[in-house]
Image (tube, grey):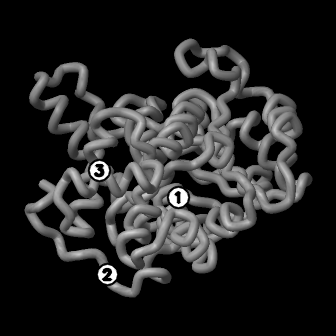
Amino acid sequence: MNTPTLDPRVTERRNPRTVDIDLASPLAIVDLINAEDRLVAEAVASQREAIAATITHIERAFRAGRRLFYIGAGTSGRLGVLDASECPPTFGTDPDMVIGLIAGGDRALRTPIEGAEDDPAGGAAEMDAHEIADGDVVVGIAASGTTPYVRGALVRARERGAITALIACSEPPPAMRDAADVCILPIVGPEVLTGSTRLKAGTATKLVCNMLTTGAMIRIGKSYGNLMVDLRATNAKLQDRSERIVIEVTGLPREEARALLVAADGRVKRALVMHALGVDAATADARLAEKGGVIRRVVPNAPPPVSERAS
């Protein structure tokens, strides 16, 4: 009898530790999944240098006024869209600065579009449609490392002059590797349910995306210490957070902090520089622009130590 050929993709292999999960109690299922999830952080840590190199590329793109794109299919595409959509409220960025693309378009965020991921021309067409150019960074996300749609996008993005990166949780074939300037490969092993890459692979992908945008945003001055100083106060929660950040840094009473934010048109970073230097909004903006938007280069003092004042 011939031995069947096993799929070379680790994301498609059966996990020997969960073969009896269908007989497990709810608590045992939780323990099995949790034990597998514990492997994810170490897999991501093994890619620290590749992640850091990609952050450097993204920082360079942002400072040149260029863009970051995520592109993927299914869960991978949804995770890219999620990370991109969180950047404007978190970092006060323009929605066109970080863009998430998914095979099948926005309808695929909720409804699977069968066959879209198998179309490399579709990925290439997205790069053309968004006029990818020299200075942009395109990050393909493909848990299996083989998605044709992603490969097509990376190949075309590189042809158009972009820096390309790949996030995959299985060793990609040569054609996919060759399309990426940087490969980020947190190999998390077989899933709890065979092939269900929304589990460990999805978690690893989310962690990597978190690092890429957060790291690049920090590098271009979107934080002061560990405080988010470029958030947009688009709701009551974020308005309160903005005021608490100003209070934490300046020691002002809330009413004065609120008035300072009004004078700064709601921009926390601008308000902090205005207060520290005793200048108006235009001067604060000019000083920040001279120093690449990084408060620490404008205001020599570090943020105050962690206190209970803003808790």
Mark 1 sits on what residue? 212
Kindly report the distance in space between the C-alpha atoms of the residues bearing marks 1 and 3. 32 Å
From the viewer's side, name the closer residue of 78 and 66: 66
Picture coordinates of residue 213, whole percent (x, y): 52, 55
In screen coordinates, is 303 left or right of 280? left
From the viewer's side, name the closer residue of 30 and 150: 150
Q: Is residue 34 above or below residue 286?
A: above
- Identify the disc placed on residue 302: 2
Q: Residue at x 84, y 55 (%)?
A: 158
Q: Residue at x 47, y 38 (%)?
A: 13
- Identify the disc placed on residue 258: 3
Quarter of the image that includes the C terminus:
bottom left
Kindly report the distance in space between the C-alpha atoms of the residues bearing marks 2 and 3. 22 Å
Kindly report the distance in space between the C-alpha atoms of the residues bearing marks 2 and 1. 24 Å
Q: Secondary structure at mark 1?
A: helix
Q: Residue at x 56, y 76 (%)?
A: 287
Q: Is residue 210 above or below residue 307?
A: above
In screen coordinates, is 25 left or right of 19? left
Q: Amino acid at mark 3?
A: Arg
In screen coordinates, is 309 left or right of 85? left
